Image (cartoon, rainbow, N blue to C red):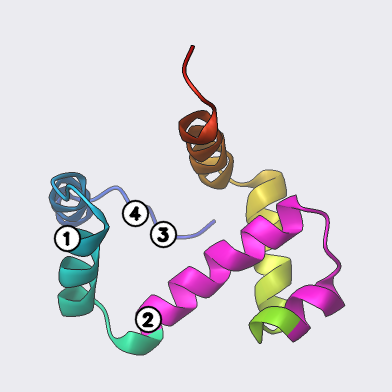
Amino acid sequence: MGRDIRTKAVDSFFKAVLTLRDQEECYCFFEDVCTVNELMSISQRYEVACMLKEGRTYNEIAELTGASTATISRVNRALMYGKDGYRLVFDRLKEEETPQS
């Protein structure tokens, strides 16, 4: 298995992320923390996950996002066998879209 990511440094980073209040604060923080390429790679993986959830094919996703089939496969593996982080976010975003009665 891979390395354990649960470290004090990662805990501290996640606590910092959880203090961000809106999209603009996210832009400011992540532009300081990540290189442009890192941020684009992370956002591409999320975009791939969204498209896989919609049932799009690997070829279609590769064409639309520029992601390699290896990246698409890695994201698909995370969706199928990962920690359900993508699903958690998808569910919460769907809840936000659902009008409150």
Q: Can you name the residue that lies furthest to the top here?
A: 101
Q: CA distance from mark 1 to mark 3?
A: 30 Å
Q: Main secondary structure of the magenta part?
A: helix
**Mark 1 or mark 3: which comes first in sequence?**
3
Residue shown at the point (43%, 80%) measured from the top left: 40
Q: Is residue 69 visible?
A: no
Which numbered disc covers residue 80?
none
26 up-or-down from 14: above or below: below
Helix, strand, or loop for circle 1?
Answer: helix
Which numbered disc covers residue 5?
4
Whether the residues at callouts 3 and 4 have beta carbons within 8 Å, the answer is: yes
Helix, strand, or loop for circle 4?
Answer: loop
Q: Is residue 89 magenta?
A: no
Q: CA distance from mark 3 to mark 2?
A: 20 Å
Q: Is the residue marked by circle 1 packed among few (<14), some (14-19), or many (20+) residues within 10 Å?
A: few
Q: Is residue 87 left or right of residue 3?
A: right
Which numbered disc covers residue 25?
1
The part of the chain drawn in magenta is 38-63
Q: Is the residue marked by circle 4 packed among few (<14), some (14-19), or many (20+) residues within 10 Å?
A: few
Q: Amino acid at mark 1?
A: Glu
Whether the residues at callouts 4 and 1 have beta carbons within 8 Å, the answer is: no
Q: Residue 69: x percent and y percent?
A: 75, 80
**Mark 2 or mark 4: which comes first in sequence?**
4
Q: Is residue 80 left or right of residue 45?
A: right
